[in-house]
Amino acid sequence: MSGPYIVAEVASSGAQGSRVAGSTVFSDYWALTKPEVNFLILITTFVGFYLGCASEGRPFSIALMFNVLLGTLLVASGTGTLNQYIEREFDAQMRRTSRRPAAAGRLKPRAVLAFGIALAAIGSIYLAAAVNLLASGLAVITLLTYLFLYTPLKRRTPLCVLVGAFPGAMPPLIGWAAASGRFNTEAWTLWALLFLWQFPHFMAIAWMYREDYERAGYLVLPRGKTRVPVVILETMLPLMALMVFSIVKFPMRPAAIHCSGVLLGVGFAYFGVEFALQRSRIAARRLLAASIVYLPLLFGLTAAFCGGFKTM
């Protein structure tokens, strides 16, 4: 009587183990795409698309919005995956990244490479076919500059932060290109906002994990006596510039955008000053949290103040 029971129990355990293993593999591939980064990318792409429609006086197309967000998401996911493939050996030396699927060896490098190329290629082709060539071209440029300029420079010079901020600010331009097929001053203002935001955001991360970066051989921060002055400058100057760009006039309801931009900028700058004075991990963590709150709120409020569209 015990035989069938044992067989059934073993079969049940085996099935459960398979489900757990399958779930783990899915989670690893999901982690490769860097979903937390993609969330901010999608927000800024959407706002670029939304304001691009408003600038051109075009109806807001839900179908086109879906296409640009999906295509951008695929390319961004492919970029994040390929970045982890390239840096897997270095990520393994950092406490913060050692548990990543590629760094920890849970996924074979060949599988990670194939997955990243597939996502990036499908996303680029999808943008070209379903949106337009300009949006697709910008996405491809973003991928190439991130992987083949910014990524290798991280081990050579602290200027990598400046270089990486250029492709990092592309998402709103991709959205704008999808909506209008061209750029104007407002489009470049969105790009400038995101470009500047990246410096205090990354300085907070780099300071929190500076020993980790040094252990892996990254030069994201200068060494020696210039480290502290450079960190303060790269935090505070962009924050001050953000205060200016946040109140640049958009064509719709500028007063509301000005007020929200100033209030958010003052709050963000407060945490930047705290970090510059204390230079502690706690202050860096607070600045990082402030940056993550600031960007979606600023872009979200900007889009909210530009209503009045007809949908298609």
Image (cartoon, rainbow, N blue to C red):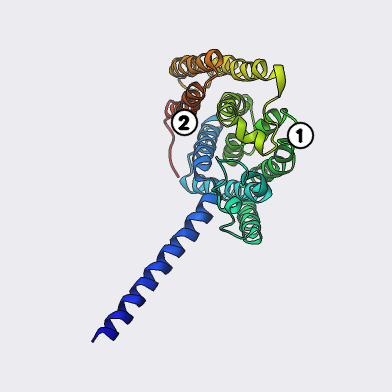
The x and y percentages for residue 40 are 51, 37
Q: Which residue is outermost to the right?
A: 156
The x and y percentages for residue 261 are 48, 18
Secondary structure beneath disc 1?
A: loop
Q: Is residue 309 above or below residue 267?
A: below
What residue do we see at 70% from left, 24% from top?
222
The x and y percentages for residue 184 are 64, 28
Mark in front: 2 vs 1: 1
Q: Is residue 18 above or below residue 141?
A: below
Residue that mark 2 sits on: 296
Give the image quarter of residue 175. top right
Please state, as top left, top right, bottom left or bottom right, where the C terminus lies in the image. top left
Front residue of this view, candidates 31 and 267: 31
Q: Is residue 273 above or below residue 70?
A: above
Front residue of this view, candidates 149 and 44: 149
What residue do we see at 58% from left, 14% from top?
240
Please state, as top left, top right, bottom left or bottom right, where the N terminus lies in the image. bottom left
Total labels: the figure holds 2
- Ranked by sequence position, the earlier of labels 2 and 1 is 1
Q: Is residue 96 left or right of residue 153?
A: left
Give the image quarter of residue 56. top right
Residue that mark 1 sits on: 156
Residue contact between numbered discs 2 and 1, judged by CB atoms under 8 Å:
no
Secondary structure beneath disc 2?
A: helix
**Which residue type carries mark 1?**
Arg
What residue do we see at 65% from left, 46% from top?
83
Q: Is residue 25 above or below residue 256?
A: below
The x and y percentages for residue 26 are 48, 59
- Tell me the number on the disc at residue 309: none
**Which residue type carries mark 2?**
Pro
